[in-house]
Image (spheres, grey):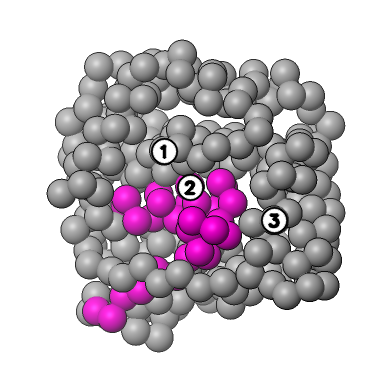
Amino acid sequence: MIAQMSGAGVITQLVTDALSMNAQQDWEDVSLFTPYLNDQALINEYADCLAVQTFLRMTSLPFNVRQRPNVEFISPDGIIPLLRINKTLITGFHQIVDFVHKKGVTLTSHLSEIQVADMRANISMIDSLLTNIELYILWKHDETYQKVTKDRYGSVYHWPLSTILPILKRRSVLSELSDKDWEAKSLDEIGEQAEKVFRTVSVQLGTNKYLTGELPTEADALLFGHLYTLITVRLPLTNLTNILKKYPNLIEFTKRVEQAYFKQ
């Protein structure tokens, strides 16, 4: 892409090096900071927060969930959830997974190189497509924005911020979607993208317990976060849920992961 490392690239490398060194710390005093999940978090945020919780439970690493109204703004890069281990802050699903891997804790030791590559491809597809779909519905679909998004996003702020911040956030998200050629898509096209994701992971899952067989990986954690959210959260637009219901093995997968890691 860019032949020379930019200033942002230098910063990224410095952060990566720091995480590698900080990964040697003992796993203690670990907190996962999220928005208020029941009252504030939007579906993409809820999915990511749930995915990280699921991944950490799969690794059996202890942590505490701390819900705060301003996690988006205390996060160094605005990405949530935010993991704090001692004085180190790690943001978002991907960086948290990478940090845990650097501590020598992995869910992929039983996989071949080809399976690891397939798993990473699944993560990329799930993350990029489902997140864009969720952002489109939340901020582009007007009924969802008016009835759900703006109230939840502004719920923790006093007026006039409760009115102003959702408007500013909507402009920002729609601009990002436009840059990715998603803002101009129709609802039918959004449904086609959702169908693509659900069909692909449904075929790969088949009758297996998890995407790669009998043991879970971070791809299962991420998939569960999104599927559980789409199944359980009520939105004015029901298209995604109706499409998802066409794949019963994905519904069963979601129930199975919930039972294994959240109802023990």
Which residue is found at the position 25% from the left and 55% from the top? 57
Q: Mark 3 belongs to which amino acid?
A: Asp
Residue numbers of the magenta segment: 28-55
Of marks 3 and 1, the one in the foreground: 3
Q: Which image quadrant is residue 237 in?
A: top right
Residue 107 sits above or below residue 84 on the image: above
**Which residue position holds label 3?**
151
Percent position of residue 75, x then y: 57, 73
Q: Mark 2 belongs to which amino acid?
A: Ala
Q: Is residue 114 magenta?
A: no
First in residue order: circle 2 vs circle 3: 2
Q: Mark 1 belongs to which amino acid?
A: Tyr
**Which residue position holds label 1?**
228
Please name whichever residue, 181 or 236, is drawn nearer the observer in this view of the structure: 236
Which residue is found at the position 82% from the left and 72% from the top? 160
* CB-based contact (under 8 Å), mark 3 and mark 1: no
Judged from the image, the secondary structure of the residue bearing numbered disc 2 is helix
Please name whichever residue, 4 or 204, is drawn nearer the observer in this view of the structure: 204
Q: Is residue 243 left or right of residue 180?
A: left
First in residue order: circle 2 vs circle 1: 2
* CB-based contact (under 8 Å), mark 2 and mark 3: no
